[in-house]
Image: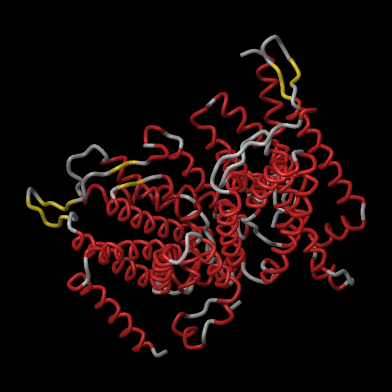
Amino acid sequence: MELSFYLVQLLNAIQYGFLLFLVASGLTLLFGIMGIINLAHGSFYMIGAYLAYWLTDVTGNLWLGILLGLPIALLVGYLVERFAISFLYQRDHLYQVLLTFALILIFNELQQILWGTDVHGVAIPAILAGSIPLTENQSYPIYRLFISAVCIALACGMSWVIQKTRLGMMIRAGASNREMVQSLGINVNRLFALVFSLGVALAAFAGMLAAPVDSVYPGMGENVLIISFVVVVIGGTGSIKGAFVGAMLIGLVSTFGKVLLPEMASVMAYALMAVILLWRPQGLFGRAR
Amino acid sequence: MPRITRTLLLLAALLTLVFFPLFGSSFYVGLLTRILILALFAMSLDLLIGYTGLVSFGHAAFFGIGGYALAIAFQDAAVIHLWQALPLSLAAAALAALVVGWISIRTSGIYFIMITLAFAQMFFYFFFESPRYGGDDGIFLFFKPVLMIGSADILHLDSENNFYYFVLGSLVSSYLLLTMILRAPFGKVITAIKANEHRVCALGYAVNRYKLVSFVIAGTLAGLAGFLEGAHSGYINPSYMSWHESGIAIAIVVLGGMGTLYGPIVGAFIIVLLQDFLPSLTDHWQLLFGGIVISVALFYPMVRPACCRDFMRCSEVK
């Protein structure tokens, strides 16, 4: 157990945190702007991973697979929003829970029909297959660094879109006062459909990126979903900054938990959430209500 | 529907249930036992969703804890004494509900949904990953609980019929207990909290304490249901507290009608019969089941017929 070992763990924690951030940022936007609780968000992560596996198999190239898979994910998100979610904006959260719970059942079944119940792997592209040696017997895979780099770029891109563009302005305004935005002549329905589809695409993209690192298996979305909920709760709903900090905290706690306290590893993230909630019930960056 | 008709209907249903084992085969008695246990579980959730206005998505945790308390304490015992096992399960579930509730109650809305879910997952993973408590495989119980005074057997739950009556008795007493609680001033206050929390707060009630007590009562009753399910199947595993279980319970409550105590019983019948019937139609029955749940979420509050609305007391009033 020397320094380089902890360095590897730290890099792993950051990479895991970034992937969580991609899923959780979509979730927190849906909460904050649309007031929607989306349990099916993990299913979109799973769909992304399976699309990457399937399209890589067909085209023989992960990049092409991601490129083809993203529009499919966007389309799935758009259809789900139009034909299911859009009816529930004015209704109690209870019905959103029920509807998106049923969506999970349906997506899981569809996944079994389309791709079966086997566990699959996706090969890491040849350019990124190597690893960087840290010491004589420790090295770090380039692909994991690549994931972190892509996520950093995406996070910067997202913060630019939200802070500097007209679309971002509408999203921020929608988060603070939906009726006002509507009465100012902005088509809220279209805005919501766009935000939902983008959130779905982000989750699916996270699944695609993760596919070569983790294996692709049924039910993979559900683990990610629950831990993303924890991230959103810790960070505060509607706050992208909160999602980022929460994702990094959870990444650190679960990665180092596995190393230092393997028996309690999966409980620790939830314990962290409980402690933070005792201190700040609205989350780290949430607005007090 | 006038109150007298409703009471008569309920009594008729109860009589049917009481006399069923005299005519039905033991397979159907077993199925009915399962349905009644699920009904009890859903009824306890309805106290939160339908009366207190707390949408808990982690209710299965207390169901599982009730079962696990029984299994952990008595997995090696030669005799499971009912008077030891039952209070232990109830106390374990109540304690867990007290701790989880104390933290979760401070939040509301979407937060509350997610936090209860996260706590349930915490318990799930705790049992899933602990080899001492069977991990993924769970724990087997080889005996059914017995009630003895001295050395005289009073109630032996070995026979399917005895177990059935014990479950029916538990369901009916829980129903009566909840009815009493809801008629008491406490019940009026929690119903008022659902309607308008701020107003109740302004009237000087300690809203959070009422919510917490309601949460603990619901958790304890869920523990009772978990105890019954564990004792009935003789097998407890982490899937008892999986979030699918919590989701199904919500579906039962909404389908049967929130804010009534008999609604969840009706819902449990519908859901279990669907789950038993649909797989005979197609291998991919989850698609159909998911479709039905989606239609419930989308259309049920709108199309519930007027006579039903009275009978089921529509709780959509805002």
- The answer to whether B144 is drawn above or below residue B125 in the figure is below
In this view, the residue in front, B243 or B74, is: B243
**Residue A52 in the image: x percent, y percent?**
71, 44
Residue A233 horizontal side relative to residue B135, left or right: right
Residue B136 horizontal side relative to residue A211, left or right: left
Q: Is residue A243 visible?
A: no
Q: Is residue A129 visible?
A: yes
Question: How is the protein colored in the picture?
Answer: secondary structure
Q: Which residue lies furthest to the top in this view?
A: A136
Residue B202 in which image quadrant:
bottom right
**Residue A164 in the image: x percent, y percent?**
92, 50
**Residue B211 in the image: x percent, y percent?**
50, 60
| Total count of labels | 0
In this view, the residue in front, B239 or B194, is: B239
**Residue B164 in the image: x percent, y percent?**
24, 63
- The answer to whether A9 is drawn above or below residue B131 in the figure is above
Q: Which residue lies furthest to the bottom in this view?
A: B2
Residue A151 horizontal side relative to residue B58, left or right: right
In this view, the residue in front, B208 or B28, is: B28
Residue B4 horizontal side relative to residue A78, left or right: left
Q: Quadrant of the N terminus of chain B?
A: bottom left
Q: Which residue is drawn at 80% across and 60% down?
A: A194
Q: Quadrant of the C terminus of chain B?
A: bottom right
Residue A155 in which image quadrant:
top right
Residue B317 in which image quadrant:
bottom right
In this view, the residue in front, A22 or B102, is: A22
